[in-house]
Image (cartoon, rainbow, N blue to C red):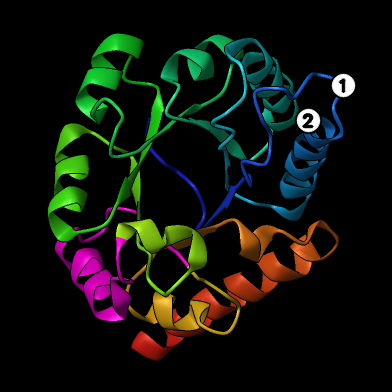
Amino acid sequence: MPLNLSRPILYLITRGATTEGTTLGAPEFALILHQVSAAVAAGINLIQIREKQLTARVLFELVERASDLTRGTNTRLVVNDRADVAVGAGADGVHLTRQSLDAAMIKKTFGKEVLIGASTHSLEEAEFAQEQGADFIVFGPVFETQSKKLFGPPVGLEKLADVARELRDFPVLALGGISLANAPDCFAAGAQGIAGISIFGDLQDLTSVTHALRSAAKGAIQDES
């Protein structure tokens, strides 16, 4: 599926705060749907349902309800790792991790129209994801962040720039420790978007955050010209 989204691409990732004990009536279940609604209203391009511990039944219900909220809007919905749930529940696609099937297998199994994102941490991984048919990648962690320490030290802006340059016009989204203060540096390095959890975490201020990021991207483009 062509990723025909306005740039910069803003990618909200849910917090993964649910558990295998989360039910359809749980507050955290309702909070995610509220987050999806707020993201659609704020003009977020992409949302990833990253709730790894939910049972398959509850995850399917969550994605189905979230899909109802994004359908007919400019916001695309993907599900972490579970392409089967994504396709069955009406989402736009799947986000792949290091442990997932590769993009080529997903396309072969579920069809070419499935939107595929992939997490990458090196140029080699980024190039492989592109070659296998991913529609976009996230690259990072660009900056130090507590949640990404298991991936080692941050890759930094220089490597982000290398990946953006080597992949040319392919959508590369910066991930990891991104804030309104350092987002302009990511755009200047060539990132075509921003992915994150914390940066989009304040639902009351989500519209202001999206406006600030779009202004930062616009400023980076003007600086290049």
Q: Are marks 1 and 2 in contact (CB under 8 Å)?
A: yes
Can residue 195 be spotted in the picture?
yes
Please check the rendered image and state whether residue 161 is part of the magenta-colored stretch, yes or no.
yes
The image shows residue 184 at horizontal and vertical percentages of: 49, 81
Q: Is residue 109 left or right of residue 31?
A: left
Residue shown at the point (24%, 80%) measured from the top left: 158
Residue shown at the point (50%, 82%) measured from the top left: 182
- Answer above or below: position of 173 versus 66: below
Q: Is residue 204 left or right of residue 137?
A: right
- Answer above or below: position of 163 versus 47: below
Can residue 173 be spotted in the picture?
no
Q: Which sits in the foreground, 169 or 146?
A: 146
The image shows residue 106 at horizontal and vertical percentages of: 29, 20
Q: Amino acid at mark 1?
A: Gly
Q: Looking at the figure, which quarter contains the N terminus?
A: top left
The 10 Å Cα crowd at callout 2, few under 14, some 14 to 19, many 20 or more, is some
The image shows residue 34 at horizontal and vertical percentages of: 82, 40
Residue shown at the point (20%, 43%) measured from the top left: 130
Residue indicated by mark 1: 25
The image shows residue 165 at horizontal and vertical percentages of: 19, 69
Look at the numbered disc 1 and give the secondary structure of its residue: loop
Name the image quarter holding residue 67.
Answer: top right
Give the residues drawn in magenta, as a range.
152-176
Residue indicated by mark 2: 29
Please check the rendered image and state whether residue 19 is part of the magenta-colored stretch, yes or no.
no
